[in-house]
Amino acid sequence: MEFEQQFASEEACREYLFQLRWPNGFQCPRCKNQKSWKTIQNLYYCTRCGYKTSITAGTIFQDTSKSLMIWFRAMWYVTNQKHGVSALGMQRALGLGSYRTAWAWLHKLRCAMVRPGRDRLSGKVEVDETYIGGPKPGKRGRGAAGKVLVVVVAQQDGKRIGRIRLQRVADASAESLNDAVQKSVEPNSIVHTDDWNGYKQLDKLGYTHEVIRHTSDIGKNLLPLANRVVSLLKRWLLGTHQGAVKISHLDYYLDEFTFRFNRRTSKSRGKLFYRLVQQSVEVPPVLIKNIVGDKSGN
């Protein structure tokens, strides 16, 4: 009821976006001027360069034909479902006429779940990999045929798991693994791994590398924190999405899982909604034609 009262009109939604996008007042995207006047088309006209912009331009809402009220309800619905939502479920909940619209919106919101410039993990972390994909014949372990390799980084918080990072990699080579660790973990952190050769260079990259287990076969005796994350990830993909996640779209689902996992202890649904809307105005527009492939454009 509180949500419906606060966002009962399109104008209320636009004002909320304005406060998140320009907390210190309007700023022209072109010349950074802070003075403008509002047109009857709800555009902001810069008094210096004459550039016109809307509150949704340059965000995931750009060029949408739907009202912001529906978008806000979609974000509220997504953040209020503990285990995530399917496109069909969101289509039914919001009364969207097209399954494709619900599917595209969910992928756009998943893009917004990755905060631009997010900080890297620090302290003690566990790093391991797992493969995602349906059962196929052939070899197992690193390099398993028909599988996609995902690096799992789990931060240690006492005996619990702190925050996590998930990243798809091309292979289990040193180049791929080192790049994944450097993107996810701050230098001078303590990194626990197995004895796989791909991790041998971590000491040279500024990390304190500690080999915890001396077996390198994926799927057996994984590091405890990383193993738990892998188990929860696969259960989530199978339970919420019935395992119907295309490999070309896996990156988006990894982002959603990370967003939900790192905020699993939050008791405020309103704060999760706030964070998602806040990040939605910070990420650039997401085109449907780009969603068809993965984030690398494949």
Image (cartoon, rainbow, N blue to C red):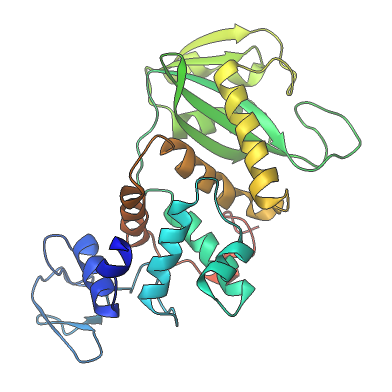
Counting the numbered discs, the total is: 0
Find residue 285 and report its horizontal and vertical position in percent.
Answer: 42, 67
Residue 184, placed above or below residue 288: above
Instruction: Describe residue 4's horizontal placement relative to residue 221 as left or right.
Output: left
Find residue 205 and report its horizontal and vertical position in percent.
Answer: 45, 20
Instruction: Describe residue 243's horizontal placement relative to residue 100 as left or right.
Output: right
Q: Residue furthest front?
A: 1
Residue 219, placed above or below residue 17: above
Q: Residue at x 47, y 56 (%)?
A: 78
Q: Residue at x 24, y 85 (%)?
A: 42
Residue 78 vs residue 177, the one in the foreground: 78
Residue 51 vs residue 37, the one in the foreground: 37
Instruction: Describe residue 82's horizontal placement relative to residue 142 as left or right.
Output: left
Find residue 277 and report its horizontal and vertical position in percent.
Answer: 34, 59
In the rendered image, the quadrant that contains the C terminus is: bottom right
Q: Residue at x 73, y 53 (%)?
A: 244
